Image (cartoon, helix red, strand yellow):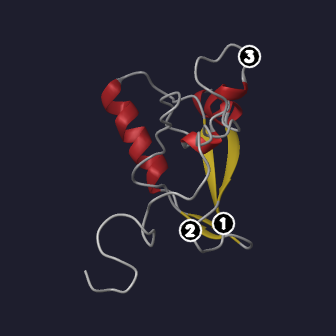
Amino acid sequence: MAVAAVLNSLRVQSILMGQHGGTPRLYWNLYLTPPTHHIRHYEEWIDLIRSVVFRTALYGTGTSIEVPFRCSRCGAIDHPAGHCPFPEVQGWINPPVNQSTPQRGRGGTPRGKGSQRGRGNRRGRG
């Protein structure tokens, strides 16, 4: 039966992502085998799945996000780059996620906003 095959293929994975200055948000990825390989029917199936609203007692209401994630490390659409599992795989061609950025060759602070060099001076007269 096609319905049973689709339901038996269902796998759910959560992603907890921090928000700038706010409460972390929980996202859910649903993985399942579609009931058809016909492109028009597949698109209708995806539209149907995306229209479902999930209500829970603990997390409020969940809906499909309009723009899926797009990982800049591996190209996947189910996670952002900060959650990419591939940099931890031995032999991955990019640097690992936890590798820090190269240190400055000389000490001192960066010359950004509020620094002593650049336009203007410390007295605010141009």
Q: CA distance from mark 2 to mark 3?
A: 32 Å
Local packing at callout 1 (Cα closer than 10 Å; few below 14, some 14-19, many 20+) is: few
**Residue occupying the point 42% across, 21% down:** 37
What kind of element bears circle 2?
A: loop
The image shows residue 100 at horizontal and vertical percentages of 67, 40
Q: Nearer the viewer, mark 2 or mark 1?
A: 2
Are the residues flagged by discs 3 and 1 in contact, CB closer than 8 Å?
Answer: no
Q: Is residue 8 above or below residue 23?
A: above
Nearer-N-terminus badge (3/1): 1
Relative placement, left or right, of 58 versus 24 is right
From mark 2 to mark 1, how far is it between C-alphas? 9 Å
Which residue is tagged 2? 20
The quadrant of the image that shows the C terminus is bottom left
Residue at image point 66% right, 27% down: 87
x and y, in percent, of residue 108 in the image = 59, 56
Q: Which residue is mark 3?
A: 90
**The residue under label 2 is which amino acid type?**
His
For the residue carrying disc 2, how many other residues have a C-alpha within 10 Å: few (<14), some (14-19), or many (20+)?
few
Name the N-terminal-most of marks 2 and 3: 2
Residue 59 x %, y %: 69, 69
Give the residue type at disc 1: Pro
Q: CA distance from mark 3 to mark 1?
A: 30 Å
- Which numbered marker is on residue 72? none
Q: Amino acid at mark 3?
A: Gln
- Residue denoted by label 1: 24
List x then y, in percent, for residue 49: 49, 47
Q: Residue at x 43, y 48 (%)?
A: 48
Specify the quadrant of the image occupied by residue 19. bottom right
